[in-house]
Image (cartoon, helix red, strand yellow):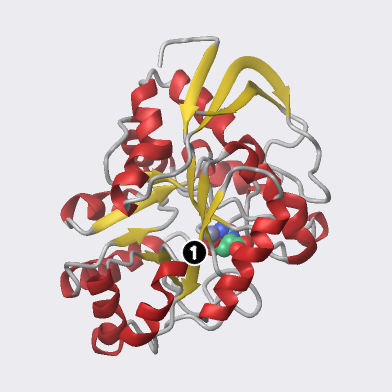
């Protein structure tokens, strides 16, 4: 993108977002609802969202938290191998995808899957493929922390081969190994966060430990970030923006035993514009990354919000109602100037 003073993004989509519940939901939902047309909402509440009643009720709470904003929450269920076709048919109209967590791998994922036995998963995953419900996956094993995602690639390959009609979305990829897998299997897609395009493990733990940059999967090596940057900047059609904005209260981050998650929702679009500009990538590719690709992959048609950004320094607030964002109190290059509805 040539250096420019103003950029308009149409119908931005965040294809991986944690909105939480209760007071936190009411405090942070507007940060996403203002600037995004829609977002895939993660189901890792306590207890996880896993029934029709729960998903309908959670959507209602989200809509009430966002007030007048023009924003569609694309709801998800927390995957269970026991989901059968009758259940999935009954809930299909309420959801956009189903999220699979390996058991215990991240925040509130204790009830997730262990073992990844294809035959055990077959009834649920075949029904999802038939009903065209995408499967979003947190792809990490419980191995050594830097190797967890690369080790999970063999599981992605096993699932992609066993269920060729199932759309499998590798969530928040952080490694070159995942980028390579994406190219090999037609039914694999991916989301990438903005923080994984910007930081490596060095930024998290190379100097003073930075709890607000600690997340799952942890940021990796420079060569991994390069591989992610390449496919994001070229607007690769199988890759979508998913912030994985994951707020935790300040006391849970600045603690002995720091919760995993980076809160980026209020600055995500500004950072993406700056990043694409810095790397001379086209606005067309940015538009594909933040909306077009997701529309094609998920078959969704979001409301046409237009977000006008201008090159004007923005000082990131120290906190948003007790949640510390990425780059708190630092200046970023772009600000949001105006939001309109087309
Ligand atoms: C997420 C959370 O806090 O819910 N944390 C994170 O570090 N990304 C869960 C997740 O997506 O892994
Ligand atoms: Zn997440």
With 150 as the anchor, is 46 left or right in this view? Answer: right
**Residue 24 visible, this orientation:** yes
Indicate which quadrant contains ligand 1. Answer: bottom right
Residue on which disc 1 sits: 145
Residue at figure coordinates x 62%, y 68% from the top left: 58
Residue at figure coordinates x 42%, y 40% from the top left: 225
Residue at figure coordinates x 80%, y 43% from the top left: 319
Of residues 104 and 19, which is closer to you in this image?
Answer: 19
| Quarter of the figure that contains the N terminus | top left
Which secondary structure lies at badge 1? loop
Residue at figure coordinates x 57%, y 46% from the top left: 71
Task: Answer above or below: position of 181 versus 95.
Answer: above
| Percent position of residue 98, x then y | 42, 69
**Residue 157 in which image quadrant:** bottom left
Task: Answer above or below: position of 40 versus 157.
Answer: above
With 157 as the anchor, is 69 left or right in this view? Answer: right
| Percent position of residue 275, x then y | 49, 26
Task: Answer above or below: position of 320 versus 256.
Answer: above
């Amino acid at each position: 993108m040539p250096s420019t003073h103003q950029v308009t993004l149409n119908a931005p989509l965040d294809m991986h977002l944690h909105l939480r519940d209760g007071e936190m939901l009411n405090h942070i939902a507007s940060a996403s609802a203002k600037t995004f047309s829609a977002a895939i909402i993660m189901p890792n509440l306590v207890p996880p969202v896993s029934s029709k009643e729960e998903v309908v009720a959670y959507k209602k709470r989200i809509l009430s938290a966002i007030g007048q904003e023009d924003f569609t929450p694309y709801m998800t269920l927390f995957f269970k191998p026991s989901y059968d076709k009758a259940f999935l048919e009954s809930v299909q109209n309420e959801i956009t995808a189903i999220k699979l967590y390996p058991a215990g791998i991240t925040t509130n994922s204790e009830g997730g899957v262990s073992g990844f036995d294809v035959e055990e998963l077959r009834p649920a995953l075949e029904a999802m493929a038939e009903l065209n419900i995408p499967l979003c996956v947190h792809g990490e094993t419980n191995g050594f922390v830097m190797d967890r995602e690369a080790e999970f690639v063999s599981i992605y390959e096993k699932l992609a081969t066993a269920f060729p009609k199932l759309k499998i979305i590798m969530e928040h990829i952080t490694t070159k190994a995942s980028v390579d897998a994406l190219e090999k299997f037609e039914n694999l897609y991916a989301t990438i966060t903005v923080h994984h395009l910007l930081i490596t493990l060095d930024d998290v733990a190379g100097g003073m430990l930075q709890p607000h940059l600690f997340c799952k999967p942890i940021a990796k090596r420079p060569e991994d970030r390069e591989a992610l940057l390449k496919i994001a900047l070229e607007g690769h059609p199988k890759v979508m923006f998913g912030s994985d904005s994951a707020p935790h209260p300040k006391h849970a981050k600045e603690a002995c035993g720091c919760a995993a998650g980076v809160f980026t929702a209020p600055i995500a679009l500004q950072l993406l514009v700056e990043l694409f500009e810095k790397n001379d990538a086209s606005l067309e590719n940015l538009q594909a990354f933040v909306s077009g690709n997701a529309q094609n992959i998920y078959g969704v048609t979001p409301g046409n919000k237009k977000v006008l950004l201008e090159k004007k320094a923005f000082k990131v607030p120290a906190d948003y109602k007790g949640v510390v964002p990425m780059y708190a109190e630092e200046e970023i290059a772009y600000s949001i100037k105006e939001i309109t509805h087309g």
